Amino acid sequence: MQKLLKYWESLCTSSVVLRFVDANLRGIGQVMFQDNPLTGLLFLIAIAWGSYAAGVPHVAIAGVVAVVVATLTAYWLRLDPASIAAGLYGYNGVLVGLALATFLAPGALLWGYMVLGAAVSVVATCGIANALKPWGASALTFPFVVVTWLLLLASYGFSGLTGTALPTGSVVVPFQAYEASPLQVVDLVGGTLLSISQVFLKASGVAALIFLVGLAVNSLAAAAFALAGAILAVLTAHLLGAESNLITGGLLGFSPVLTAIALGTVLYRPSGRAAVYAAVGTVFTVIAQSALNVALMPLAIPALTAPFVLVTWLFFLPRSWVESGSATISGAIDASPP
């Protein structure tokens, strides 16, 4: 594997086109904190499969276009070349593209809207990263969340943009909780896999397995924490009596998956203490996900990865009291401009 990556990197050194492709693949991989073009390629295959299986192939195309636009925007703004090459200005862009194509009806205006959102995500990444510098925290996927929230909310005021999969705006209403006890194995497995695939807004078990392979290619620890985080999220949601469709559809698990990877493998040195800390953060992310789902229900917009961002910041900021010694922060999620 290392030989293959070294060969690819040697090809990239002599080709501007391949370097650009490499930066975009790394941008896709950085959604789950992986600075690896092969991981990005596997993630892209999973996105394509999940989109095709759901009958919405344009969503995968939107993701590709968005990450390309974001990377080009970073070049145009003359941002740090090393950060661009590592895909640090592309991961929010690809999520913006996938989200807008998922929640809004296809059409010419959607593509223009998506291109704008992908470009603005780069500006938002720089601004948020600068604002967080005094605390040593990363922007994570908050640029994606803010930009997508604004674009989705604005769509209600434009007749040219129509929502297709947006939540129904309402106050909190009674729901059908998961009734089977204990949790059925098929629902546990399905909910776990979809918790992983829903990070990229895909509801596909096959895509989830490809995502796990992509993680394992670069980091076995990241793959393990993603899987463990998904299982813990599903079990927590069931224990708390969450709505059945949210449990089995992975809709309470995708933010916890990201929290588990971030706290367990990226922001803190790997240790038993860090693993327990990550588990607590993962459980709390399930609660934060449900809280934001309820809070945003009247606005009829999804919480996206906001629960992951808020909980990860919450659990990262007191780092000097959590670890004996300073925590290590990976450059994989620090997209601060020079």
Image (spheres, rainbow, N blue to C red):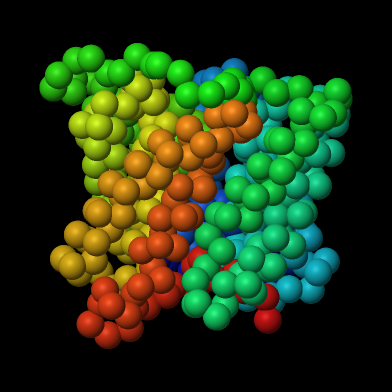
Of 273 and 76, nearer the camera is 273
Of 303 and 60, nearer the camera is 303
Q: Residue furthest left?
A: 182
Image check: 123 left or right of 297?
Answer: right
**Depicted 189 relative to depicted 23: above or below:** above
Where residue 296 sits in the image (x, y, percent)?
56, 35
Where residue 60 sits in the image (x, y, percent)?
63, 34
Q: Where, quadrant-wise, is the C terminus in this rendering?
A: bottom right
Q: Residue at x 28, y 78 (%)?
A: 321
Q: Residue furthest bottom?
A: 325
**Depicted 274 relative to depicted 37: above or below:** below
Q: Residue at x 32, y 27 (%)?
A: 242
Residue 276 falls in image quadrant: bottom left
The number of numbered discs placed on residues in the rendered structure image is: 0
Where residue 58 sits in the image (x, y, percent)?
68, 28
Q: Where, quadrant-wise, is the N terminus in this rendering?
A: bottom left
- Please indicate, yes or no, whether residue 218 appears anywhere in the rendered image: no
**Depicted 1 relative to depicted 168: above or below:** below
Q: Residue at x 44, y 63 (%)?
A: 313
Image check: 130 left or right of 237?
Answer: right
- Please indicate, yes or no, whether residue 297 appears anywhere in the rendered image: yes
Residue 165 falls in image quadrant: top right
Q: Residue at x 63, y 38 (%)?
A: 98
Where residue 109 sits in the image (x, y, percent)?
85, 31
